[in-house]
Image: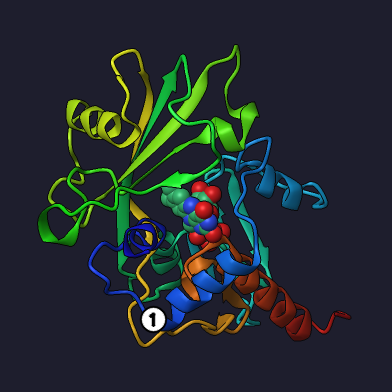
């Protein structure tokens, strides 16, 4: 169980809040883990589909109180400036800290290797962890979990190929292991040859997830200044669920502040 949780929490040293870990376990026990058929972008696309005016690929550079002094803010973007009486920053923690002047959020990192293989080493839709003992209470190689992703989401590959992921953790000295080492560990885990697997991409994400040390401070305030709001996983629990809950909390606060019916 520790190996599984280490991958989910992006924390191989057990430094995360026990309360947060229990919340996660509750979700796994009551729900069924899954992947959107059309990829993770299906989630933001679904959220955006009901919005009137969405401008993509337009970075926000700064957010400042307007000179009018009425609590509105001026947002400077690569596409011009926008002024609003309610401005919501829904970015990653580092950008939110920069834009809203918040303290930095400690983050945890991982590397995901994606392989395209001619055959599945395992046809079950399972996350595989190596339960054997290696250095420092970790597995005997750099991979903390792996999965034949197409066994759970067949639409993630075409032409009969299979997609396999392997995750290493950047809080470990072997988190940046090279391809040969990762391949060797995967071959050991799945008990198969991996020589004909092609690397599709290696995602190195140093700021993958906000740290959740005890005591757990979720339910961060929605409003950080009059007319300025911040939401995201760093304002609730470090998860998609936390990001959604935080977003809903901010939406309720904005509606209340501007006097709109909820
Ligand atoms: C490899 C990996 C696997 C994960 N797996 C899971 C999982 O299985 N289940 C789960 O619950 N969570 C998972 N997570 C965590 C989950 O992805 C995050 O908790 C969630 O995406 C946070 O949502 P968010 O809306 O707070 O922020 P984000 O999803 O980070 O969205 C913030 C957005 O703000 C944009 N942005 C940032 N700065 C600016 C700027 N200056 N101007 C304009 N836009 C800006 C970014 O481009 C981004 O689109 C995983 C994370 C990683 C890295």
Packing grade of label 1 (10 A; few <14, some 14-19, many >=20) is: some
Could you say which is closer to the camera, residue 217 or residue 69?
Answer: 217
**Within the image, what quadrant is residue 35 found in?**
top right
Residue 46, position in %: x, y?
75, 48
Classify mark 1: helix, strand or loop: helix
Q: Could you tell me if residue 89 is visible in this image?
A: no
Residue denoted by label 1? 18
Could you say which is closer to the camera, residue 221 or residue 63?
Answer: 221
Left or right of 93? Residue 170 is: left
Left or right of 192? Residue 225 is: right
Could you say which is closer to the camera, residue 244 or residue 23?
Answer: 23
- Residue at the spot x=60%, y=38% of the render? 152
Residue 193 to residue 172: above or below:
above
Residue 88 to residue 60: above or below:
below
- Residue at the spot x=37%, y=88% of the render? 215
Left or right of 132? Residue 94 is: right
Residue 219 to residue 13: above or below:
below
Residue 259, position in %: x, y?
82, 84
Residue 240, position in %: x, y?
57, 61
Image quadrant holding the C terminus, namely bottom right
Whether the residue under disc 1 has CB within 8 Å of ligand 1: no
- Residue at the spot x=12%, y=60% of the render? 136
Q: Could you tell me if residue 179 is visible in this image?
A: yes
């Amino acid at each position: 169980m520790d190996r599984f949780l280490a991958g989910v929490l992006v924390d191989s040293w057990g430094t995360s809040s026990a309360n947060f870990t229990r919340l996660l376990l509750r979700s796994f026990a009551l729900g069924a883990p899954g992947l959107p058929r059309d990829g993770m972008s299906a989630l933001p696309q679904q959220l955006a589909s009901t919005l009137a005016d969405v401008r993509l690929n337009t970075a926000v550079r700064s957010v400042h109180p307007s000179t009018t002094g009425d609590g509105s803010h001026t947002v400077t973007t690569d596409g011009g400036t926008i002024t609003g009486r309610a401005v919501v920053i829904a970015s990653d923690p580092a950008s939110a800290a920069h834009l809203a002047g918040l303290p930095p959020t400690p983050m945890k990192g991982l590397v995901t290797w994606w392989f395209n293989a001619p055959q599945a080493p395992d046809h079950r839709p399972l996350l595989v962890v190596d339960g054997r003992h290696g250095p420092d209470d970790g597995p005997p190689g750099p991979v903390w979990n792996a999965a034949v992703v197409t066994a759970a989401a067949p639409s993630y590959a075409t032409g009969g190929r299979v997609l396999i992921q392997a995750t290493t953790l950047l809080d470990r000295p072997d988190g940046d292991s090279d391809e040969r080492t990762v391949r060797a560990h995967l071959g050991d885990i799945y008990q198969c040859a991996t020589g004909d697997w092609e690397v599709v991409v290696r995602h190195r994400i140093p700021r993958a997830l906000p740290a959740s040390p005890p005591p757990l401070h979720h339910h961060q305030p929605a409003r950080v200044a009059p007319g300025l709001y911040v939401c995201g996983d760093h304002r609730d629990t470090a998860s998609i669920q936390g990001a959604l809950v935080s977003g809903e909390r901010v939406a309720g606060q904005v509606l209340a502040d501007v006097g709109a019916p909820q």
